[in-house]
Image (cartoon, rainbow, N blue to C red):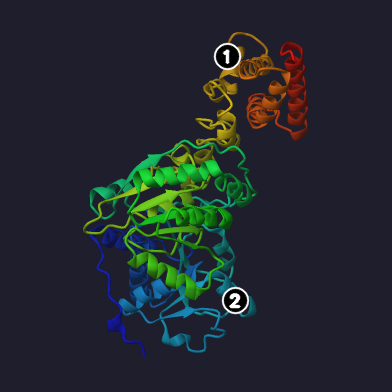
Amino acid sequence: MIDKSLFKKKELYPFQKKVVNQIINELVKEGENFNLLFQLPTGGGKTVIFSNIAKDYIKKTNKKVLILTHRIELCVQTSKQLTALNVENKVINSLVKTLDDQDQYQSFTAMVETLNNRLQENKQFIENVGLVIVDEAHNNSFRKIFQYFENINILGVTATPLSSNKALPLKDNYDKLIVGESIKSLIEKEYLSNAETYTYDVNLHGLKIGVNGDFTVSSSDKVYSNYFMQEKLLFAYEEVAVGKKTLIFNSGIESSRSVYDLFKKHNYKVRHLDSTFSDGDRKDILKWFKETPGAVLTSVGILTTGFDEPTVETIILNRATRSLTLYHQMIGRGSRKLKNKSVFQVIDLGNNVRRFGYWQEYIDWQDAFNYPDRFLEARLSEEDDLLFEADYELSRNLKEKLKNPAKLEEFSMKHVYDTCIEEGKKGKEAVDVSLDNHFEVIAENSEDMYDGLLLLNEMQDDIERRLKHYTKCITKATDNYLNWLKETYNRQLSQRIRAELDAE
């Protein structure tokens, strides 16, 4: 028998009480087959809100509530809250094969994959369900569950009402969006800590976009494991966060392990955590992180949801993402309020702030829900995001060989192209201007033809970057055309080096 006194009931804040009543009234008014989506920022207390909604719904309708999550930690967290509210509930985990005792419970909490397996075997696995609550509703994995339930209500809960799959917008499954308190409002009312954001310009050349629309793990690992990015990470940490409890988000295991090695080398208290760790190891590491002042935890993915450690003082985004949802999830891990913590730090090493704006900025979530394509298109296109980085940084190896590296770094193919068009010239002349610029830098840093050809070889990354910009400008970005352009460019440049830089 569970001792319910061990579970502490969380009292609702005024804004939470208001939204619980609003959602219950909406569901009762609209009746069956009406689906609501509720948006509230990370840290606003979604679990305690929907747990109270479940309690009130059961009381009003005498029907059961099913709560879906995608992490076992969230199932357990939700179950504890329901128990504290005196709601008889059961967690459906991998060990639960049948529900012969379901009459004893008012609510069930399940991981979506586990429940889907049970429903495939038995469509009547759970009976008398009136409300399905979907946590992290932006994930499309939940859709497959809906087919097993008829004449019910669905309540989706998310911090960002944008589908994880652009082809499957949330408005297809939900009839209405209710927007909760904004981040700015929760900060002003002292429910959330405010974020001090530090941005560092980084060169993301080399990142590739995968089928899910975000940067691939393999390309991110390659970019973020290199010496220059590691150097910038350490510099940023030592400038802003030394001695503060710090959570570092990485895209891949390789880059996270590189971060661990880097911080260990400089004698900082650091641990690494990823999805390959056992439950026991994970618990030990999180306990160490909680109890160790100034601890640094470098991680991959698994701490973006279902992780609550209020003592986090600094969030480092050691990755770039094109997902607004992930951006808010990562930063939200530092927003928990404590008596002695009204501010936390965010260090952005992925140009994410430029991509999405500051975490506290107002977002029209109704527009995002009703017109997701327009909302997303209003932001940078994929090509702009990849190719037109605000600032470009040469490799240190090349910089050291140049008298004035700024001549290369400050050259903007897009600006030159736009100028050519405005002056009535052909766009192709932008490539000639670029070639002249490269030759000028090679000539002033080479004693002879051989030095020039060696320097040309060092400049290949910069040449490719510029020509990619050019193909974007003329909307002709096929690999074959780009390869032809690079071959022609290098041939013309090497011929000019041979002709004008005499070998002594």
> Closer to the camera, 56 or 113?
113
| Residue 487 pos. (x, y %) | 77, 26
Instruction: Residue 351 in the image: state x and y as whole percent.
Output: 48, 39
Q: Residue at x 74, y 16 (%)?
A: 503
Report crowding for label 1: few under 14, some 14 to 19, many 20 or more residues within 10 A (C-alpha). Answer: some
Give the amino acid at mark 1.
Thr
Write down the residue under mark 1: 419
Name the mark on residue 374.
none
Task: Name the amino acid, label 2.
Answer: Leu
Q: Secondary structure at mark 1?
A: helix
**Which type of secondary structure does the marked residue at label 2 adopt?**
helix
Q: Nearer the viewer, mark 2 or mark 1?
A: 1
Residue tagged 2: 119
**Farthest front residue in view:** 504
Q: Is residue 356 left or right of residue 117?
A: left
Q: Which quadrant of the view contains residue 263?
A: bottom left
Q: Residue at x 61, y 13 (%)?
A: 420
- Is 460 situated above or below 59? above
Alpha-carbon distance for marks 2 and 1? 62 Å
| Residue 81 location (% of width, % of height) | 34, 73
The mark that comes first in sequence, 2 or 1, is 2
The correct choice, above or below, for 204 with respect to 435 in the image is below
Residue 175 visible at all: no
Quadrant where the image shows the N terminus: bottom left
- Left or right: where 248 falls relative to 51: right
